[in-house]
Amino acid sequence: MKSLLKPLLAVLLVALPSAARAGSVTIKGSDTMVILGQRWAEAFMKKNPSIKVQVTGGGSGVGLAALQNGTTDIAMSSREMKKAESDKLRARYKAPPVHRAVAKDGVTFYVHQGNPVGTLTTEQLRGIYVGDVSNWKQVGGADAPIVAYSRENSSGTYVFVKDMVLAGEDFAPAIQTLPGTAAVVNAVSKEKNSLGYGGAAYAEGVKELKVKKGSEEIAPSADNIKSGKYPLARDLFFYLRAEPTGDIKAFIDFALSPEGQAIVTQVGYFPVK
Amino acid sequence: MDRQATMEQGLTQAVAAPRLSTAARRRQLREKAIAGFITLMAFTGIAALLLIIVFVAKEALALFMDAEARHEASLSKMFMAQEGRYPFRWQPVSDTPKVSMIPLFVGTLKITFVSMLVSVPLGVFGALFVAEFAPRRLRELLKPVIELLAGIPSVVLGFFALMVLSPVVKDLFHLDRPLNGTLAGLALALAIVPVIFTVSEDALTAVPRSYREASLALGATLWETAWKVVLPAAAPGILAACVLGFGRAIGETMIVLMASGNADLVSWNLGDSARSMSATIAAEMGEVVVGSTHYSLLFFIGVELFLFTFVLNMVASTWTKKVLRRLTGSAS
């Protein structure tokens, strides 16, 4: 019976609005940022054993919704908050939401390792994903159909590519979508005519495309992403209901400290500072 | 003897005979408690089903009640052709959301069609072989092995399709894309064959021995007996097996999500990618903004799926009755 009680108690504790409890911080949101958040939490709790940090995923939208209904202190988001979401928060808490950029992520386009194409412009990428370009021949490759993969429309990366590359247009119907960046990388590594995208941290067994801007070919390298030169880089955010205080502030300060930013690099993203 | 008499009395005339021994009364109470408990269990199942329906329908209802949602996802936008480059699109995350259900219907039916095309003959004939022709040793090997296939988690089957089956299917059918409706249908068939097989096999073995003996005694061969006597006699059970398999196919999520490519195409070409209804719910529910139109839409897809299986079950049960009447027609 005692062994049953413990998990039950844990569930109850989680279910309670934990925002009110002292000595604990809950973080929820983007699946892209879950690993990063957990590493930060582990390192932070080692230094401050009295404060409990709880990190869960679910997605940027889930995190921001949880921020709205008060079940999380910090929402992790790989996209900027939409106007509808910030309006709702403002209406409910009488104050505009606060955000901090805590890391940088680059969206990289991948091709099969045997593909001769090494560089594409954003216009060419846009052409492929909106359905104007369907053969590698049209962008300087072999005469073969382009098998283009995308992410599910619930992912922050999807929205990012849609905004940054497609300029808000819809993906063509023939574009296949896969659940998760790992699945995209996997599919691209197996199919020689394929093209996919995802976070820079995941590229293994595939060739990363450079993006051509003007006459310059920019690789998705750490330096280029950090300096903002690589055109397809984004910030990863923490969203809060109000200016951070107490434990929450301590955690965010830790994430932005040199030690916290070193963890960002370890996990495979890029520091903001 | 005495005890039994009291017990019987207690059961039949509980009210009329107030003077019972304490032991008997206790036993009676226990019986009642057990009966009540079992009834409660039965109703819990029904209650759970009802609550699920109410919950899903309630979340979907916002689609028709909320003015903004009604504008964004009207019935005509969901089911009629829209203007623009593509008349039917499922792009709910967009500046102007496109919420046509048609690609999802087409995708679901396409994948289900492929999987049924493969799994019905495989399952039924497999069952016929095991029930009628296989030597006992072979039957004792085949049956558990095929039933074991049913125990494989669908996510594992999906991963298997994605990693192992996709290049094979692509080369075999000379397709452009490794992930497509055919692959999803074939992978799905792996999950459905055991369902159809098991239920059909049970139906076939339940056919009375006397039928077979009579047929053989009249000079029919083994094959004639199996095909013309046993199979028709087991037809209702086999139909039920197929309906069960169909229901599983239409609702199966993980295999389809991983193997179909999930492109919202409206194409009956089996080599093209397909997006199914269940996979759409699974893929998008995770990050959707709670309470938004998109959220209600996903629940609405759930309602549609529920209606699909409900109607299918109704049609199948009336059809089964019809077939049964035809088979036993002259007799009744």
Image (cartoon, rainbow, N blue to C red):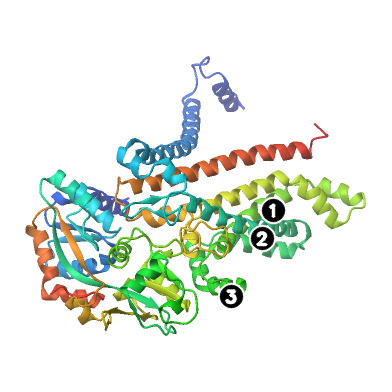
The label nearer to you, 3 versus 2, is 3
Where's residue A52, x and y in %?
Answer: 17, 60
Q: In the image, what residue type sits under mark 1? A: Glu
Q: At numbered mark 2, what does the secondary structure look like: helix, strand or loop? A: helix
Picture disc at residue B143? 2
| 10 Å crowding of disc 1: few (<14), some (14-19), many (20+) | many
Where's residue B145, x and y in %?
Answer: 63, 64
The residue tagged 3 is B171
First in sequence, mark 1 or 3: give its number.
3
Q: In the image, what residue type sits under mark 2? A: Lys
First in sequence, mark 3 or 2: give its number.
2
The residue tagged 1 is B201
Distance, label 1 to label 3, CA atoms, is 34 Å
Where's residue B229, x and y in %?
Answer: 81, 48
Q: Nearer the viewer, residue B108 or B220?
A: B108
Q: Residue at x 64, y 50 (%)?
A: B242
Discs 1, 2: same chain: yes
Q: Nearer the viewer, residue B66 or A237?
A: B66
Q: Above or below — where is B126 with respect to A267? A: above
| 10 Å crowding of disc 2: few (<14), some (14-19), many (20+) | some
Q: Where on the picture, by quarter, is residue B61?
A: top left
Q: In the image, what residue type sits under mark 3? A: Asp
Q: Above or below — where is A27 with respect to B56? A: below
Tell me if label 1 and label 2 are in contact, CB under 8 Å.
yes
Q: Is residue B220 left or right of residue B2?
A: right
| 10 Å crowding of disc 3: few (<14), some (14-19), many (20+) | few
Distance, label 1 to label 2, CA atoms, is 9 Å
The label nearer to you, 1 versus 3, is 3
Distance, label 3 to label 2, CA atoms, is 32 Å
Q: At numbered mark 3, what does the secondary structure look like: helix, strand or loop? A: helix
Mark 2, chain letter? B
Mark 1, chain letter? B
